[in-house]
Image (spheres, helix red, strand yellow):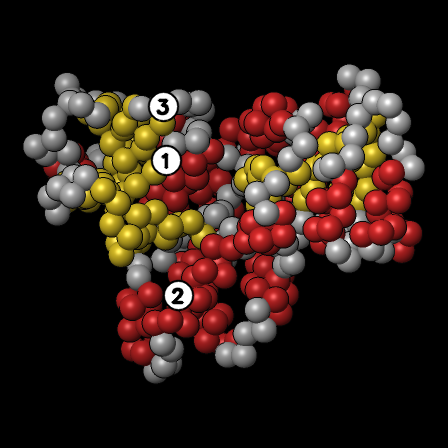
Amino acid sequence: MEMLIREHYLAQIRPFCDSDLVKVITGIRRCGKSVILRQTADELAASGKNCLFLDFDLRPVRSALPDADALIRHVRDRIGSEKLYVFLDEVQNVAGWNEACRTLRLLNCSVFITGSNSKLLSREFTKELSGRYVSFRVRPFVFREAQAFMAQSGREYAISDYLIWGGFPDALIQPDESTRRRYLSDLNDTIIYSDLENRYRIRRKDVFERIVDYVLVSNARILSAKSISDYMLGQNVSVSVPTVIKYLDYLREAYVITDVPQYSAKAKSAMSYYRKIYDEDVSFNSLRRVGPRYDLTHNLENVVLNELCFMDYMVHVFNNKGREIDFLAVKAGKQYLVQVAYSVAEDKAYEREFSAFANLDNSCKKILITADDVDFSTSTVCHYRLKDFLMMNEL
């Protein structure tokens, strides 16, 4: 299947192509980092630039260039009078990769790298490259990307499918639901067991896995380390709050979860103790559901959060004097209050969702997003149908 050109990310990378900063493409496993690295290389090569692409997932490449010294010699031999654009895929397989990158960026070349989440996470960039890098966070497909990707092969991907199975590229191409679930289950196991448990040498693996399951199936809900510890104690599992904090940090580092802090209208600041946790991809919730009923309500809110992040909004939960509004989204000095519900067709749901905006002035645009087809907009609140919101580039 032809690869989708992910212009959203390529546009972010282009201004840095000639920079001496190391360009790091990061994100959760199997979200398409290597594809974007290749697309960047292809684009530069098509414009006549000298490019060198090395994939260290391939054994012959790893064998020929096992360490920093070998890699530096290999690149140096190919540098001429014009700048060389060097692309290093899965660079963590090179012993001393950090030394190689620091050296190569000082030569007449521009360096781009990706790395596996099992060995190269955001804190490694900070530590090993000492500020001499710029990173680009890649995510699984948002809905419009998933739809365009499937359309290339004449297939459809409905919003209902997306709310269950999310946007991992290789999951989309599976021929049916059972193979899609199997692929995602294997990916989940690789991230949780191979990457995190092995990387951090977690001894109480059963406890870690139960906490991960609880967190990922509780997406779009308020969680704290203490509430998780208390829940586990109720399940006859004793785990300390510091240990839970450590486990949550592991999930953040591997881009498995995103947590969103509360913004207090009264304090006019973020409050770090109050956070909602969202899955990087809603399939993490669906995999943990037993039976045919999926959690479309919370997955819908999770999808909206992922879309807002994709649109580069800074996002908080908003506390309106005890009434929670799902998101305060901010970009370029503009603020939007966004409430999300699966449906407000029933009177009770309508009252609950619209009342969240009570007593707020019109300094922020108020938006309600639901899966309803009927337009429920009022004089003060704009209702966006989910199918329309998923195609927007801006609020």
Neighbor class of circle 1 (other Cα within 10 Å; few <14, some 14-19, many 20+) is some
Q: Please give the name of the residue rendered at 85% of the width and 51% of the height, measured from the top-left corner.
A: 69
Q: Is residue 336 above or below residue 249?
A: above
Badge 1 element: strand
The amino acid marked with disc number 2 is Ile
Gap between marks 1 and 3 measured at Cα: 10 Å
In the rendered image, which quarter is residue 377 located in? top left
Closer to the N terminus: mark 1 or mark 2?
A: 2
Q: Position of residue 222 (x, y in %)?
A: 28, 55
Closer to the N terminus: mark 2 or mark 3?
A: 2
Q: Please give the name of the residue rendered at 16% of the width and 43% of the height, measured from the top-left corner.
A: 267
Gap between marks 2 and 3 measured at Cα: 33 Å
Q: Position of residue 75 (x, y in %)?
A: 85, 39
Badge 2 element: helix
Q: Position of residue 210 (x, y in %)?
A: 44, 71
Q: Name the residue carrying label 2.
A: 245
Q: Position of residue 201 (x, y in %)?
A: 58, 73
Left or right: 8 in relation to 380:
right
Q: Name the residue carrying label 3.
A: 332
Closer to the N terminus: mark 1 or mark 3?
A: 1
Q: Is residue 273 above or below residue 109?
A: below
User: Residue 314, labelled with which disc?
Assistant: 1
Gap between marks 1 and 2 measured at Cα: 23 Å
